Image (tube, rainbow, N blue to C red):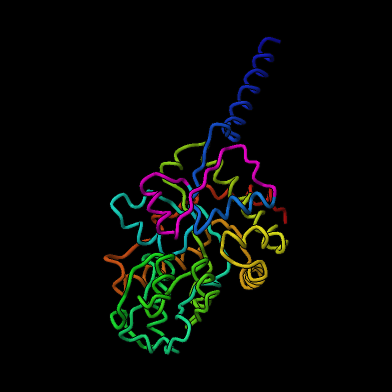
Amino acid sequence: MRIRSLGWVFTLLTLAAQSAIADPDLSKTTLSVASTGWKVEQAVLKLAKLDDTPYRVTYQAFQGGALGLEAMAANKVDFAVTSEIPPVFASLAANKGNFKIIAIKNSSTLHQELIVPPNSPIKSVAELKGKRVGYIKSTTAHYFLYQMLKNAGLKWDDIQRVEITTADGVTALFSGGIDAFASYGNSIKAAELRGATQLASAENILSGNFPIAASEISLQDPGKRAAFADYIGRLNAAYHYAETHPEDWAKVSADPTGRPYDVALADIKAEYVQGPSRYLVVSPEALKSQQDVADTLYATGLLEKPADVATFYDSTLDVPINQALAKYLPQ
């Protein structure tokens, strides 16, 4: 009897240990999230009533994914959604950026554009030769501007390049400081509401893949690893809710993005049709797309040396991420 009792005790202790490993106490865990443009993740989770996380989440807004990764390199944030371009540049930093890509957000590529001010005489990309063109360094704008110039028969050195921020770019466009502006998101929407017009769209240049970066230091913390997976599952379900309740999402997102309600609603509907937001574990296709971007950046001289993107991807959270995706948005 004593041997049997000891056996039961051992079994219970083993199960308890396994449970502790599988479900760490997240009450003392904090995720610091880098948002692009505005605190969109916080807003969409609240709208979908999925913000009741068992861990604490703080948010910082940055003007682009490159700035979010800079903060991650300095260990100031744990989590960031970026485009395919910033990770390539960040990976070549001294500490290799202190990040790993753990998942992909596939989403719309609308509002990634090259624009000109009202009444501009410039009617085609080819007419930008010798002109001052603003862009945000190490972002999608950097990449798609190069591709647009190439498609128009121009070289990178055929324009006067102006590295600028999203906000300053809009100001410079309307003050005459630049002749055209390559940007994305809120800055494009704000400029077009003031009369700027699209010269070219990156809709069919970009893949729609937005890598999700986690701090390498954070990935060593079991609590944060569990929180990353859970948070991604919640975001996936929250975006699905927002996109299938566009009126509610437009009410929430209009003011922070500087758009009237009717414009926000039209944008949300168009984005959902063109590319609904979905969170996924990294696929071979996504990895290839990222490598193609890196190879292009190197071939054009925008990178000092080649980048092997596989070195900054991490698949060790695939199982818990897939579990969280299924938990919050069952198929």
To which quarter of the image does residue 292 belong? bottom left
Position of the C terminus, as image quadrant, is bottom right
* Residue 120, image x, y percentages: 44, 86
Between 130 and 283, the one nearer to me in the picture: 130
Tell me the residue at 62%/73% (across/down): 274
Q: Is residue 123 above or below residue 58?
A: below
* Residue 105, image x, y percentages: 55, 60
Q: Is residue 29 shown left or right of residue 67?
A: right
* Residue 329, image x, y percentages: 70, 53
Q: Which residues lie in the magenta part? A: 49-78
Q: Is residue 199 above or below residue 13?
A: below
Between 187 and 324, the one nearer to me in the picture: 187
Tell me the residue at 63%/67% (across/down): 260
Q: How many marks?
A: 0
Q: Is residue 50 shown left or right of residue 214?
A: right
Residue furthest to the top in view is 2
